[in-house]
Image: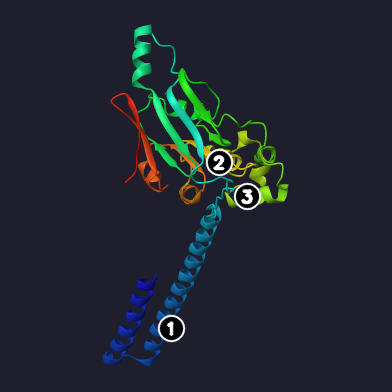
Amino acid sequence: MRERQERQERRLAKGASDGRDANQAKILLGGQKNRAQGTTGKLRQQHAAQQEQLTQRVHEAAQQLAPEVAVAMHALAPPQAARQRVAVLEDVVLPYPPLPTEALAAALTEARAINMVISGRQRIGVSSPNGCGKSTLLRLLAGHIAPLAGHCEVHARTAYLDQQLSDLTPQRSAIDHLLEANREAGQAALRTQLAQMGLDAQLAAAPLSALSGGERLKVALACALYAHPPAQLLLLDEPSNHLDLASLEALEAMLGRYQGALVVVSHDEVFMRALHLTHRLHMVDAEWRCLPTV
């Protein structure tokens, strides 16, 4: 529009110059000038109308965009000493699906035994190929299953988040789940916690079946993080799945500040590096090894 207006102004200037040089009658020059000015006025009106129409389209498009919501996550500080033993695994063999023969069972028992002590502020990342038992290990630590062999003791309150979010009931709302996890805090405080995670009043009251995968994951995280009494051991199985960037960054920041013990399973190496892990648990040549990070 600016270019069209500049071209018209150049034509006006050129027309005035040509008129002076051509020695035309004043009445003719006046008519040409009036017509040119009329054209310029119409052009400006068209430009103004186009600009107003485009501005309106921009406003309409902006209204359709979801506002960027700041997301914050916190975790209640667990009352424990840093050197306290949270869990002890001695010659633990994970309960894999039915083994074909006794000989193979004996071989797996010897090869896959886990010996590990988890202390109060240890932060362990589990990253091994699919099928080796990462999720099974978390279920074992959460007390959902027993080992096939060996001995597992957990001396702390745990909060377990599995990939299927199996502790959630689709017909119930987020605030219902959180009130059950924390009967000490008032509903207003818990609604504030949900709002800080990007779940407003409408989402907090809706049945979970109406929420997206990422929103349901936030509900499960809220139940794990804001439970009372607070968990001393967080067990998280692929917690970064389905989260938007803002929520993922908030989760990374919260877990980076968490003062309890943490065992997290994830294939996302960028996410894992952001957690300030103290140890890595992985399987090497069919043997579980828990090694400090460098």
Report which residue position mark 3 lands on.
Answer: 193
Marks 2 and 1, how far apart at CA: 85 Å
Q: Residue at x 69, y 41 (%)?
A: 179
The secondary structure type at the circle numbered 1 is helix
Q: Residue at x 40, y 88 (%)?
A: 30
Q: Please state the horizontal and vertical placement of residue 40, each as a whole percent of the image.
A: 42, 77
Q: Which circle, 1 or 3, is nearer the viewer?
A: 3
Q: Residue at x 40, y 28 (%)?
A: 115
In the image, which disc is placed on residue 34? 1
In the image, which disc is placed on residue 232? 2
Q: Please state the horizontal and vertical placement of residue 190, each as a whole percent of the image.
A: 67, 47
**Residue 152 seen in this snapshot:** yes
Work out whether 221 lies above or below 63.
above
Work out whether 3 lies above or below 171.
below
Splitting the image into 4 quarters, where does residue 22 fall? bottom left
Marks 3 and 2, how far apart at CA: 20 Å
Color encoding of the figure? rainbow
Q: Which circle, 3 or 2, is nearer the viewer?
A: 2
**Residue 238 seen in this snapshot:** no
Q: Please state the horizontal and vertical placement of residue 86, each as a whole percent of the image.
A: 51, 37
Q: Residues within 10 Å of mark 1 (few under 14, many from 20)?
A: few
Kind of residue at disc 3: Gln
Q: Residues within 10 Å of mark 3 (few under 14, many from 20)?
A: some
Kind of residue at disc 2: Gln
Work out whether 203 lies above or below 102.
below
Q: Are marks 1 and 3 in contact (CB under 8 Å)?
A: no
Q: Residue at x 62, y 50 (%)?
A: 193
